[in-house]
Each structure stands twice: as structure tokens, then as C-alpha cells.
Amino acid sequence: MSAIEVLKPGLSTTVQDTGRTGYYDVGIPPSGALDQYSLRAANLLVGNPAGAAALECVYLGPELAFTADGMVAVTGAAMVPRVNGEERPAWESFAVRAGDRLDFGYLTAGARAYVAVAGGVDVPEVLGSRSTYGLGTLGGLEGRPLAAGDRLPIGDGPGAAPGRRVPDDLRSVLSKDMEVRVVMGLYDHRLTDAGREAFLGTTWTLTPVADRIGFRYKGAELEMVDREPPFGAGQDPSNIVDAPYPIGSIQVPGGVEPIVLHRDAVSGGGYMMVGTVISGDLDIVAQSAPNSRTRFVAVDLDDALRARAAYRDRNRRLAESL
Amino acid sequence: MSDVQAARYSWGGDEFVFAELAEEMSLQANFRVMAITKALREQRPDGVLEICPANASYQVRYDPDVIEPHELLGQLRDLEKQVGDAHDLALPTRVLEIPVLYRDPWTTETLMRFRDRHQDPEATDIEYAARINGYASVEEFIAAHSGSPWFTSMVGFVAGLPFKFQMVPRERQILVPKYLRPRTDTPKQTIGYGGCFSCIYSVRGAGGYQMFGITPAPIYDPTQSLPDFADFMVFFRPADIVKFTPIDRDRYDAYLAEVKAGTFRITARPVEFSLQPFLDDPDGYNTRLLEVLR
């Protein structure tokens, strides 16, 4: 069986697919690629099913060696792939030969690159997915990020021709300034009008505390409504009786530094959430790096459903183009 | 029994609907959560992907391309009405015995490392909790913590972590604030406390709950090597009833040897729990409930 040898693991490289469903009620989150669109693009480029397992590489790419000939594609964040030191285009399939080494240039935009290999990363499925859930040491390769010396099995797949490319208009636009759409709600009644205006009016800066669990921002303090704490909630005005956290929900402990929970989310807790990022825009959050700037834009459920339809349409056009 | 307040519903983006049965924690609110989510699980409408009960609220993840959000919301409102105060529901569940080494060396070592984040840097977590809850000694506090059983009101935060609410009248509930700032480390299987909830940390990691002790019983096993995990890697389920049993270091080490040998099992007995008889006579009901462990 062909394999990938990990020479250098990168900062935090994990095996991810579209994630697992049905276990959030016991605290096991969906996991899966934080930028699902880029995952699908990478897979389709190499002839895999769109949801096959690939590698998610954060900020700093890994160095990998191939034991057999294969087909590779890199999408998502801008870090130039190199085969034996020679640059290859991103968003385009390219061939590798047995013994070739793949590494990456420095990150110039975005945060997470996706590396798909024809045949897919063939680690065992756990609870219906190959995705890594690090907090639970579950899925992926031994439930953890890759380490030097690891060997990743690659499945058999027909593969696609080299030079297959995603049309320019279907590639993700990466920017240091982003708008993320949010359905306000959950516990946003804990904010005063001024607090709510501050949340939606502030340009938030992503802190270095940003990983697969959540993304923490700074920029303003949100004013909260005075109250007598309900029994069991806790004394801090931002405390609630521990409640479930939607994926994409935005909690604001202490009224400062909002945290957007992503696909490795903690499934519940005791901090008020003021809204939820719409599902398609989680891909945008995934590509934000520390010091990038984000504005949260309030949309209602109908807007969110229209955005969802547009996201699906874009995925359909992506699949048709490849 | 018509004093049930109306639930508050909210959208969580385009895939979640959130329902808060009550702002305050109570066994009544939690029991209604259990009843509604149990009924929804049995109906399992197409497009419903996740049903997550929590303490006094729950959430449903759904695919809006399969089920129209307002139609789902209508079904949840119908269930709320049907369930009512849920006082008549007999919930099939389990009574579990969880051995606890209170004031163990590992959580003590950990809490000492994080005194700068604590309300009372001069005391240990359990000394602090005993004092602010009016107990004359830590021994008395342990007697209260382990004396009455706990209802698993939610499983989550991280994989398999149970939140537990003590089955005593409100005036006897222990209340302890969380750490001023969360720790970056908590030993696996720590018995924690925050607000009105006791928890068991299923994995090592960050945490803000006060640390009282540790259990030798694994409650999460992704390798599924112990017999308790033959079917599933998570041990706890919502509505599990727990008796904490204080043990000494020798007993702890003996259990740990069983864990290492792959033979350890948590004592678990099937029971049926009903809210009304419990509310009528909590201590009497608890005594009868725990007899199955003998």
C-alpha cells in the first residue's frame, strides 16, 4: 500500500474529512476540515470523493515524502507547494513520483491549507469519520496531529490527470479583513443595546488564541444587562446555567474577547452566547490568522438560508468544473 | 402543576435551534429537557442530526434542506406541550457507584500550581468550598457531597464529561464559584465543582471547576479496551444517577490495578426514576434508589 512519510509535521497538521455526526450529545463534536470548501476542492482536483480524508495544515506546512507515484492538490491558505524544492501551483492537481518530497513556502494569506492525495488518507474510520478530534484523542492518526516519523496510509484511487485546475472565480478569496455573517440570538438579550451595537460595530482583531476549538477576538467590551444571577448560573454577569453550544456560536466570557466556536467545539458551557456564525461562513473564520480583522454582520434566518443556498450552489459549480 | 413556564426558543445560525426551558437550574427543568429530547429521539424527524440535552436547555442540529426550520420549531413546541411538567414520566436509567479519593495527591499538586487564579490562595479548593458553604470541616463537606446521589443533567463540554446536579432540596445544594481564571491543566478523572454542578473530567485538559478529588474509574476510553466500553467509548449518559463513594488510597490503588489489568467495571444497576415521588420525599426516595447498589 502506498503511504506518506512525515519528515516534518508542520505546526499542527491533522487528518480531516467532512466530520462526524450524531455524537455531539455526549460532547464529541463534528470535527472535520474547518474550511470545508477548500477540502472539497482539493479532493475533487485529485479525483477523490469530495469528502475524502485529507491533511489540514495550519500556518506552517509539513514536509512529506511519497512511497509511490501519486496525484496531489493543495487548496485553502496560500503557502506554495514545492516538489523536491520546485514550486507547484495551488488549486491545481500535480503528480508526484515515489521518493518525491513535498514541502511548502511560507504562509502569505489565509491560515489553513488542505493537501489531498488521490485515494485519500486511509486511516481507520472512528464513529463514521476519519477526522481527528484532538481533545478526545480520537480519529485521524492516533487522535493527534502528525509527528515526524509518522507513516500515513493512502487508499487506492483512480486519481485524476495532472493540471486539473479550479477556475479563478471558484477559488477562495483570502483577505486580512473579513465579514462574517451571524444570526444573533441565544443569550443576546443579556447585552444592552449599547453592548449589541458594540458587538456589531467593532472591527475585531483575532488573537493568537485561535485553534480548531475556537477563535478568540479582541476589540471592545460589551455592556451587559444588570441582573440577579439565576440559581446555578454563577456570579459573573456573563454566566448562564451551562447550556449547549451550537457550532459557530459566539460566547463572550466577562463581556470581553468573543470566542467563535469551530468544529472541535466544546459542546456546552456556562458563558452567554450572543449569536451563531452561519454554516457557510465558518470557512471564512477558518482562514483567519492572528491579527486579521473581522466584522460580524447580523442576518436573519431567511438571509442565512439564502446564504446557505448560495454556498451549495458554489459547491455545485465547483464539482461541475472539475 | 400548571406552573410550568414557557420555553424560550432561538435560532443558532442555519443549522441549530436552541430551547431554554428555564433560566434557573432545577431538577424539574432538567427532567423536562430529558422528556422532550427522549420523545424527539423516538420520533426522529427526517433532517434532525443531533439532539443535545443540557441542564435546563437543549439544542437540535438539523439540515434545513431536509426539514424546514419553522416546521421543526413547531414540532418542538408541540413536544413541549405534550410533555408538560413531566412529573408522571418514569425514566428508565441507571444508578452508578463512582469511587472517589477526595483530597488526592494529583489534584492537590495541580491546584497548588494555580493558586494565583483562585479566590482563596491560602486554602485548597475543598477547604474553600467547605468554608463558604458553612461546613465546619472538610470531613462534613465530603459527607454532604457523597451523602446524596447526583442526577446527570448533561454530558458534554468535552467527550463524555458528565455534569451532575445533586438530588437534594435547593437549600441543601452546594454552591461554589468557578476559578477566577481557568486552569490550563486538570488531571483526568478529577471530581470538579462549579456553580451548582459536580462534574468528572473525562480527559486531561483546561478547566475552571474547583477540584475535590479523583476517581480511579475511567469514564472515556477511545481505545475501547475496558469491558465498560465494549459498545461505546463514552460511559455516561444523560439521566444516569450517581453515588459518590469515598475511598482511601489503598482502595484507590487496588481499583487502579484492576483498570490496568483490564478488569475494572463501574457498578451499575438499572432503575426507573420518577420526579414526583422524589419531590415528595427526596431523602426517602434516594435511600430506596440506592438500595440497588447493595
Image (cartoon, coloured by chain):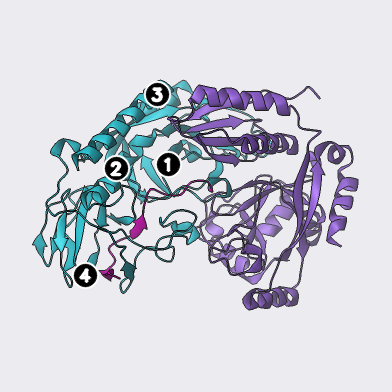
Q: Is residue B233 in the magenta section?
A: no
Q: Please report whichever mark, 3 or 4, sits nearer to the chain's N-terminal start.
A: 4
Which one is in front in this view, the residue at disc 3 or the one at disc 4? 4
Chain to which mark 1 belongs:
A
Instruction: Find residue A87 and report its image quarter.
Output: bottom left
Residue shown at the point (39%, 63%) measured from the top left = A123
Whether residue B123 is visible, yes or no, is: no
For chain B, the rendered hue is: purple
Is A204 located above or below residue B149 in the figure? above
Is A59 located above or below residue B154 in the figure? below
Is B3 located above or below residue B191 in the figure? above
Segment tinted magenta in the rendering: A1-23
The one nearer the camera, B226 or A242, is B226
Which residue is denoted by mark 3 in the rendering? A197
Amino acid residing under circle 1: Ile
Query: CA gap, disc 1 to disc 2?
Result: 22 Å
Please say if the residues under marks 4 and 1 sit with CB atoms less than 8 Å apart. Answer: no
Chain to which mark 2 belongs:
A
Q: Please report whichever mark, 2 or 4, sits nearer to the chain's N-terminal start.
A: 2
In the figure, is residue B170 to the left or right of B219? right
In the figure, is residue A30 to the left or right of B235? left
Which residue is denoted by mark 1 in the rendering? A259
Q: Position of residue B230 (x, y in %)?
A: 62, 64
Query: CA gap, disc 2 to disc 3?
Result: 31 Å
Q: Are marks 2 and 3 on the same chain?
A: yes
Badge 1 element: strand
Which of the labelled discs sits on residue A68, or is there none?
4
Badge 3 element: helix
